[in-house]
Amino acid sequence: MLQNRKSLGLKELIAIAVGGMVGGGIFTILGISVSMVGFLAPFAIALGGVVALFAAYSYVKLGVYYKDEGATYAFFKRTYPGSHLAASFIGWYTIFGYISTLALYAYTFSSYGISGTEWAHNLWIRKIVAIAIIWIFAMINLWSVKGMGRIEDVMVYVKLAILFVISLLLIYFGKIDFHTFVQTLTNDLHSSRVMSIITVASVTFVAYEGFQLVINAVKEMENPDQNIPRAIYGAVILVASIYFIIALSAVIAIPAEDLIKNKEYALAAGAEDVMGSIGRNLVIAGAVLATSSAISGTMFGSSRQMARIADDGYLPHALTRRIKGTIPSYAILAMALSASLLILVGGLRLILEFGSITFLLVSLLMAIANFKIRKETQSSDFFTVVAMIGLMIGSVLILWYEYQTKPMQLLFIVALYVLLTLGAYIYARFAKRLENFLGTSNGS
């Protein structure tokens, strides 16, 4: 009797991870990074990739050991099986981090997609387009796992090609010669503090969020023991290389004052200054593809994690419903609806910072969980401890950066955490009472 072949191979898994990472991040972090550390920005962004690699180490070890599509939530719950509260908290924080990321990607897609048109500055048109793209990819995820995988393949590898072409063109048309670049780099190296470089690496960590989505596909993947580490490590290294090349070509070709002035649209505006409308349109095409694949990949992984959390009673039970055996239909719809509501309410920049802090903290918790069972996962003490220290420093630095630059934004993030903590606490108490009730019923 022939066995059913799994839908996702290594190529599709790398596409999901890269698609989840290379979203709106690279198009928004350049200006901020250059404003903080000048021409050292490419190296600071690459340092963020090193932090992501250490964070990925614990995910890989736990993913291979547990083989649970619940990923972040399931790993923590199974490592600390006696704590309903811990499981509920990490489940809620992770899911709402993904929801904020979905909203950001969709808004970035809309901003670039309608730029240059008469509706470019119409806030409500931008929101409508953003919500529409979320629901388009929700329908694709509901349609077919294999269909989603193939579409993700095309979008990811085409956008990588576009980003590579953009980098080459920026270097070719660059206004700064190599000698000037080296001299400016040396000056920035002397004037920048080490803590500033590490802070940039921490702030840009959100641009690497997404590699863990691979683990959410464990039920649909071929050979998890080999493909989980290959896909995650390969994707992080690939994305870090892409970010470094793009950032380096941008600071070589585009005046620093232009990158700082335009910030969120630095790459598009700079490409237009250097190459004209062709350069601008090429960047817009790359941004649209990048955000599209990020929406698709994030929707795929986070919906499965949401269904897994609902299975355990920490979210509404209706979210456990699946079609075709594996596709969590109600969870996909819930993710799309929640992200749409965030877009309607606004304040996406605040939610972006919430997502960045959330994923740093959650990655730290994963490193702690891996350290606890390091013998079972066959993990290196050195790599696990270094990951814990690095993620802890990154978490503190990004909170300090928020406090110094945007105190009201930090206040909003704290308020959002209070609301999520309250919701997680209520569901944790409910799950515990249900478990006690079932235990009493079975005993009688």
Image: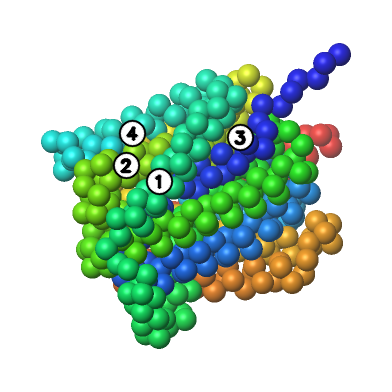
Measure how far apart labels 4 and 2 are at the Cα level.
24 Å
Q: Can you tell which of label 1 and label 4 is closer to the viewer?
A: 1
Q: CA distance from mark 2 to mark 3?
A: 25 Å
Q: Which mark is residue 12?
A: 3
Residue 131, label in figure: 4
Residue type, label 2: Leu
Q: Give the secondary structure at mark 1.
A: helix
Q: Nearer the viewer, mark 1 or mark 3?
A: 1
Q: Could you tell me which residue is drawn at 60 percent across and 30 percent down? A: 320
- Residue placed most toward the observer, 320 or 258: 258
- Whether residues under marks 4 and 3 lie with C-beta atoms below 8 angstroms apart, the answer is no
Residue on which disc 1 sits:
165
Distance of mark 1 from mark 2, alpha carbons? 9 Å
Precedes in sequence: disc 1 or disc 3: 3
Where is residue 377 shown, x and y percent of the image?
80, 56
Whether residue 289 is situated above or below residue 166 in the rendered picture = above
Image location of residue 234, percent across then percent down: 63, 50
Q: Label 3 near label 2: C-beta < 8 Å?
A: no
Q: Residue furthest left?
A: 118
Q: Which residue type does callout 3 highlight?
A: Glu
Disc 2 on helix, strand or loop? helix
Q: Is residue 432 visible?
A: no
Left or right of 333? Residue 55 is right
- Of labels 1 and 4, earlier in sequence is 4
Name the quadrant of the C terminus. Answer: top right
How far apart are labels 1 and 3 at the CA level? Answer: 23 Å
- Give the mark nearest the N terminus, 4 or 2: 4
Residues under numbered marks 1 and 2 in contact, where contact means CB atoms less than 8 Å apart = yes
